[in-house]
Structures are given as C-alpha cells and as structure tokens.
Image (tube, grey):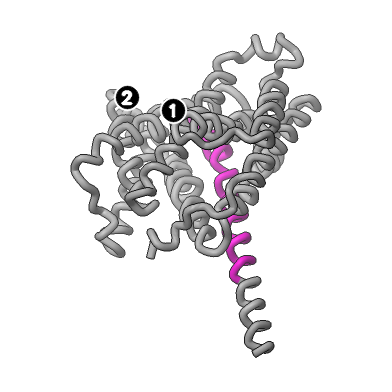
Amino acid sequence: MQDGMEIRGTQDTYVAYVGYVMAFAAAVIWGTLGVFAKFIYRYDVDPVVLVSLRGSIAFLTLLAILVAGDRSKLRVQRRDLWFFAVFGLVGVALNYMSYFEALRRTTATTAVILLYTSPVYVTLGAAAFFRERLTQAKVIALVVTFAGCFLVAGGYEPRLLALNPAGILFGLGAAVTYASYTLLSKQALKKYSSWTSVLYAFGFGSLFLLCFAGGRLREVTALPLRAWLLILGLAWGPTLAAYALYVRALYHIEASHAGIVCMAEPAATAVLAYVILGERLAPWQLAGAVLVLAGVFILQAHSPRKEASLRSREA
C-alpha cells in the first residue's frame, strides 16, 4: 500500500513537472513575438496588414487541425455568433492592432511590459461585471502594478513621455483589449471548449482585420520569401504553438500556477530583445518592470485556488 502511494506521489510530481515545463515553454515562445515583429517591420509591412496575416494564418491552421482531429469543436449555436463577433473585434482585432502599433513605435520590452498590466484591468473588469471581490491584496497589487507601469512608460522623466506618447497609449490599449480577451474567454468557456472559443475569436477577428487592412493587403505580393517565413513563424509560434502548450499545461497544474510561470514572458522578451535587437531599459524602467511583475505575481498568487479546469471541456 505504501509502495503504491509512493509511486502515485512520484507520478503526480512528474505530471506537475511536465505542466510547469510546458507553461514555461509557452512563456518563452510568447516572448519571441516582439522579436518576430521587429524583424518583419524591416520589410516595411503595415502593422494592420501584418496582424491580418497573423490572425488569418492562425485561424486557417487551427481550422484545418480541428477538421482533421475533432469536428465537434466546430459547432456553436447560431445565437452565440454575435458574441464571438464582439469577441473577435475587441479581443483579437483591436488587441492585435494596438499591440503591434506599440511594437512599431516603442521597444519590444516596453511593449510587453505595458501589455502585462492587463491583469489589473482583468481584476477591475471582473469586479465590475462578475462581482468578484476586490480584496486588500488585489488593491495592493493594482497600486504596485500601476506604479511600475508609470516608471516603464518614462513617467519619472516627463520628457520621455513626450517623446513617444502614441507608443505608450497603444501599449496600454493593448493591455486593456487583452484584458477584454480574458474576460470574454471566461464567459465563452462556460459553454464551449477553449479551442472552439479561440477558433471563432480568431475567425471573426481576422475578418475584421482584413476589412481594416483593405487595399493595403496588396503589399503582401511584394514581400520576399524571408518575410513570409517570418510571418509564418509569427503565426505558428507565439500565436498557436504557445497557446497549445499553455492549454496542455492546464491539464497538469492549476491555472493560477500556470499564470505565475507565464510571467517569464516579459523576461524572455527582454533577454531576446537585448541579445538579438540590442534593446536596453533605463534603470528606472527596469525598476518599473520589477514592480509590474510583482503586482501581477500578487494577483496570480491570491487568485482562487479552485479555478475551472479545462480538462472536462477538452476531453
């Protein structure tokens, strides 16, 4: 009996280890997004055109995978299409456009740190729309995160803010729209699997993006092969592969733990941007980045332990 318990304990430890590795791998792959974007921008690609391609390729790839693997995840009720249309517009189209504009106007590291303030808006949105309680720990986390955001944006020196107000605003816009993606996902997962939700969000989001891009899509015909390879890498790596790893990690570890591990994403972006792009943060900005991560950590660490698992929905 004791041997059986020891074996089970070892197996549980191994399963948890696999989950943490998957979550960390997802964070590192997500961290490459800014690097991909910076390289692609060297080919003078319009941000709206780039995110249109990113969303469309990701949608078509996921659609092909589900058609081949599990067609049951393609079905949604007709009355829910309007919800996914709003989901795609706000959580995908507007989020992609604002974040990639931030990447074009500021550094990859600054953009991802501003994006990582999104848990603040998720917390505020959850309190407003889902009546989740604002605890003392959450309030402290909000204050710490906003203070860090102020420093990362260059608020300690107004001249820096004046140099790039658009980049900062787009970065904060990306955080707000990403928060809406999280809140809309929470609503969608009450009824559909995560893959179904992502498929329809990507589908409608890509449709809106293609409409926004319009005639600018003609510029893709002039892109060289290397640019197309980078675009495919962007769509299949930090868009699909990272999400797949994260979802699989949720099979093995709690969502709150996975969220904490994924805080490695800004660090991964910073390291990659430093090594590959030569980007650097000023000392006060580094201090701000630490505060942002500390605030997000407090939010994640004090989230409910018993969160809805995706296992039953993905089975």
Amino acid type of the residue tagged 2 in the rendering:
Phe
* Residue in the foreground of this view, choosing between 261 and 106: 261
Q: Please tell me whether mark 1 sits on a helix, a strand or a loop.
A: helix
On residue 97, the disc is 1
Q: Which residue sits at x=54%, y=29%?
A: 124
Q: Which residue sits at x=58%, y=48%?
A: 304
Q: Which residue sits at x=59%, y=70%?
A: 15
Estimate the x, y position of residue 214 in percent, counting from the top left.
Answer: 28, 24
- Does the segment drawn in magenta span residue 29? yes
Mark 1 crowdedness (10 Å alpha carbons): few <14, some 14-19, many ≥20? many
Q: Which image quadrant for residue 285? A: top right
Mark 2 crowdedness (10 Å alpha carbons): few <14, some 14-19, many ≥20? some
Amino acid type of the residue tagged 1 in the rendering:
Met
* Residue in the foreground of this view, choosing between 274 and 259: 259
Q: Which residues are magenta?
A: 15-43
Characterize the magenta stretch by its predominant secondary structure: helix
Q: Is residue 99 visible?
A: no
